[in-house]
Amino acid sequence: MTKGKLHHIELYVHDLNQSIEFWNWLLTEKFGYKLLSHTLKNRSWTLDGCEISLIQTLMNYLEPSYNRRRTGLNHIAFDGGSKAQVDELAAELKERRIPLLY
């Protein structure tokens, strides 16, 4: 392993099934990640040794709900390729009714 290379990201989510629908499409179809593992409480994908995992938040930790402006993770940025590729992805996100920030 390369020192300093990103190894994994864990995201606790409010609704695992809803989150899987979006993240599986984005990671596998758009960015080439491979499904690594899945259980009733989590799902993980991998690409080039980096793992992204979604984990169902336990009931007693669901409130307050996530807001990107609270302390903690604000966003994850992926290299989207060329401007044309990013524009194509943005159009697909709009078709899926995924809100874009800007």
Image (cartoon, grey):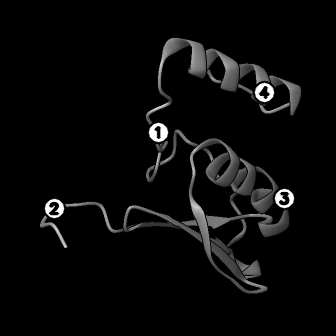
Which of these two is toward me, 23 or 2?
2
Q: Along the polypeptide, which appears first: circle 4 or circle 3? A: 3
Q: Residue at x 75, y 64 (%)?
A: 14
Query: Which residue position holds label 2?
Result: 4
Mark 3 residue type: Gln
- The label on residue 92 is 4
Residue 102: tell me if it is visible: no
The CA distance from mark 2 to mark 4 is: 33 Å
**How far apart in space, not on screen, are marks 1 and 2 (Cα)?**
18 Å
- Secondary element under disc 1, as helix, strand or loop, is loop
Q: How far apart are marks 1 and 4 (CA)?
A: 16 Å
Q: How far apart in space, not on screen, are marks 3 and 2 (Cα)?
A: 32 Å
Question: Which mark is in front, 4 or 3?
Answer: 4
- Specify the amino acid type for callout 1: Phe
Expressed as whole percent of the image width and height from the top left, the position of residue 40 reads: 79, 85
Labels 3 and 1: the sequence-earlier one: 3
Specify the amino acid type for callout 2.
Answer: Gly
The residue under label 1 is 78
Residue under the point 48% across and 43% down = 74
Crowd class of label 3 (few under 14; some 14 to 19; many from 20; radius 10 Å): few
Q: Distance between the residues labelled 3 and 1?
A: 21 Å
Residue 44: where, in percent of width, then height?
A: 60, 72
Q: What element carries label 2?
A: loop
